[in-house]
Image (cartoon, rainbow, N blue to C red):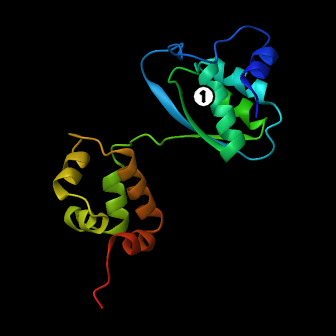
Amino acid sequence: MLTNSELKARLGHRVQIRGADPSPSFSGETATLVLRLTGPLDQPISVVRWLRDAGLTSRTAHAVINRLAEARLAVCDVAEGADIAALAAGLAKMNIHTSRRRTFAPDLIPEVRARHGLSQREFAAMLGIDVGALRNWEQGRNKPDVATLGLITAFDTSPAIIEHATLEPIV
């Protein structure tokens, strides 16, 4: 793990590490990324540079490096306009797998229901969600949250696991 002074020295310029974190160099929408260390973290300074180029402050990038070193996993937000594909490719060369949160596809829910032959009421009951909310999602009035999207995607992949998790046997 790098100390603050080592990070400053290796970056080759003055950076503010302690104290109040300055505002990120971007504003507006962000993309949440999950970084998973797949091998040794042998180029932490290069990782910091990639993260800074994606809009993270030095302090935040340093925290991400420390988290990767400790837990082999870190979550961070980068500017939506950042070249996320280039960032992921660059980090992959340094043993870091990058993934991002799925985005909502409006036709996901009716497609999943159709694949499993379920009505709105049956599908809502299987997942333990309100049928009115399901209707609103399918008609585009609202969007489900990320956890619900994950539940729907998991159900599509393995309905038996979701049934086991959400339904209780009577006998």
- Against 94, is 157 above or below? below
Q: Residue furthest bottom?
A: 171
- Against 39, is 27 above or below? above
- Toward the viewer: 41 or 3? 3
Mark yes or no: residue 136 visible: yes
Q: Residue at x 61, y 40 (%)?
A: 74
- Toward the viewer: 134 or 53? 53
Disc 1: which residue: 84
Locate the N terminus by quadrant. Answer: top right
- Toward the viewer: 140 or 126? 126
Q: Position of residue 145 (x, y in %)?
A: 34, 45
Q: Residue at x 28, y 67 (%)?
A: 118
Q: Position of residue 51 (x, y in %)?
A: 65, 24
Locate the C terminus by quadrant. Answer: bottom left
So how many labels did they put on this image?
A: 1
Q: Residue at x 40, y 68 (%)?
A: 162
Mark yes or no: residue 85 visible: no
Q: Is residue 45 left or right of residue 139?
A: right
Query: In the figure, residue 164 lies in which quadrant?
Result: bottom left
Q: Is residue 64 left or right of residue 163?
A: right
Q: Position of residue 85 (x, y in %)?
A: 63, 30
Q: Position of residue 78 (x, y in %)?
A: 54, 26
Q: Residue furthest top?
A: 14
- Against 162, is 13 above or below? above
Q: Residue furthest left?
A: 132
User: SS at mark 1?
Assistant: helix
Q: Residues within 10 Å of mark 1 (few under 14, many from 20)?
A: some
